Amino acid sequence: MTKADLVKIISENTGIIRKDVAVVVDSLFQSIKDSLATGAHIEIRGFGTFKLKVRKPRTGRNPKTDQKVPVPERTVPTFKFSREFKMSVVNVKVKN
């Protein structure tokens, strides 16, 4: 599914024109990006949690030359699905 598909589905379900739905979807995505950029933790109940995680420095390997390469510490955005979301998508009991 693409963003355009998402806009189309929301537009059909709500009766709001696609142009307005696209503005709202773009605004939502931009708000999430902006919040993460400031280091905020975003929790959407029943859906999941966006947050930043610091990855430790490590030694990697260049597969072409098999040479060891240092990979520095870095911060990456992560997303964790909520238990309710997992259970609604996969009919399997989810661990805590």
Image (cartoon, helix red, strand yellow):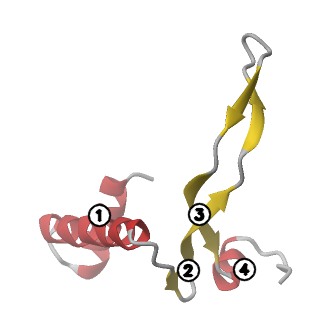
Report how far apart the C-alphas of labels 3 and 1 lie in the structure.
24 Å
Q: Mark 1 points at which residue?
A: 7
Amino acid tagged 4: Met
Report how far apart the C-alphas of labels 1 and 2 lie in the structure.
18 Å
Q: In the image, residue 84 lies at what x, y percent?
A: 66, 85
Q: In the image, residue 81 lies at what x, y percent?
A: 64, 73
Q: Name the residue under label 4.
A: 87
Residue at (36, 62) in percent of width and height: 6
On the rendered image, what quadrant is the C terminus found in?
bottom right
Q: Which of marks 3 and 1 is nearer the N terminus?
A: 1
Element marked by disc 1 = helix
- For the residues labelled 4 and 2, say whether their Cβ atoms are less than 8 Å apart: no
Q: Up-down: is 19 above or below 41?
A: above
Query: Dot 1, crowdedness within 10 Å: few (<14), some or many (≥20)?
Result: many
Report how far apart the C-alphas of labels 4 and 2 lie in the structure.
11 Å
Residue 47, numbered label: 2
Q: Which sits in the foreground, 42 or 54?
A: 54
Element marked by disc 2 = loop
Q: Mark 3 points at which residue?
A: 78
Report how far apart the C-alphas of labels 4 and 3 lie in the structure.
20 Å
Q: Earlier in the sequence, mark 4 or mark 2?
A: 2
Q: Which sits in the foreground, 59 or 4?
A: 59
Report how far apart the C-alphas of labels 3 and 2 lie in the structure.
14 Å
Amino acid tagged 3: Thr
Indicate left or right for 76 with 14 as reference: right
